[in-house]
Image (spheres, grey):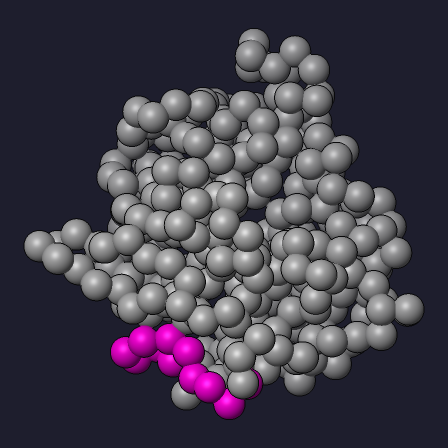
Amino acid sequence: MIDPDTLIGHGTHRYEVFPDWGKLNPATHPVKDCHEMVIDAQGRILMLTNETRNNILIYDRSGKRLDSWGTDYPGGHGLTLVNENGEEFLLITDIDRHQVIKTTLTGQVVMVLDYPREISAYTSADQFLPTQTAVGPTGDLYVTDGYGLQYVIQYTSQGEYIRHWGGRGDENGQFDCVHGIALDTRKPENPTLLITSRNHNVLKRFTLDGQYVSTIPLPGSFVCRPVIHDQYVFAAVFRSTTNRTVGSGYITILDKNDRVISTPGGTEPIYENGILQTQSQHRPVFVHPHDVCIDADENVYVCQWNANNVYPMQLKRV
């Protein structure tokens, strides 16, 4: 770990590192993999871990624990916040249970999605390993089967199957580790989906009905899920160089033109003839970042997978 006084990042997005921001007593509030984080309307930071003594840890912005709950998500992986007419819910993907679970902010289960029997490729629940969800403008749910058969599956808000697309492969409309997804409303007249193909080191843009639009290359970056804040895309890069290069992660930030402008913990983004050059870890600030969330003051919170049970950290914008 670097000196916390050292700034990381590039250009307009530089940060001071507070590695112990979310540290708690592991005897009372342990974590395993810290997979994803969201911020609710109250400004509380909710984090999902696959530790079944407290799957959800809730912090305030100072790093103080406000609450915790959850004992039923041994494979808790994806966490998405849903706002339905002012009422907030969580979507949790569980790769051990092979399900997507919708809950209240206090943990009451509202809906459960099992494996998609409507798709003939799925013959058993074991094939369905959902990693992430997103919610469309009309409430439709999108689920990425990132550790399973590599499909994106679209449902109504009530969990009724609409369509699917993707599958494993190297074509424009296919994926290799379709790990994350986000609704991009930065162009309100034309919302799209940003979807990760992690082993390809890219984000792919699709229409809301699954038509391929474009690819954003991120060479060297095994990116988790895109997180859109204001006019920027933030993402945790769990590993760089190769997907077997242990402890090589960082954060990447893209502007509204899909250009990388800052890589906290990584090498400086350089474009030659309009092409982003391969990036890698520059400083060992992180082990395996798995997700980020951003608060109203532009501070970034980072949680990590397979990082010796470390709690989330804060990157304070400077």
Pick the front one: 185 or 301: 301
Asked where in the image residue 113 lies, by quadrant, the reply is top right
Residue 219 in the image: state x and y as whole percent: 31, 48
Q: Residue at x 58, y 27 (%)?
A: 148
Q: Residue furthest right?
A: 27
Residue 176 in the image: state x and y as whole percent: 44, 31
Q: Residue at x 32, y 76 (%)?
A: 10
Q: Residue at x 37, y 38 (%)?
A: 200
Instruction: Check if residue 6 falls in the magenta segment.
Output: yes
Q: Is residue 225 visible?
A: no
- Would residue 219 appear left or right of 121 to someone viewing this image? left
Bounds of the magenta span? Answer: 4-14
Q: In the rendered view, would you say 215 is above or below 305?
A: above
Q: Residue furthest front?
A: 245
Q: In the rendered view, would you say 54 is above or below 153?
A: below
Asked where in the image residue 232 lies, by quadrant, the reply is bottom left
Instruction: Check if residue 75 falls in the magenta segment.
Output: no
Residue 252 in the image: state x and y as whole percent: 39, 62
Image quadrant for the N terminus? bottom right
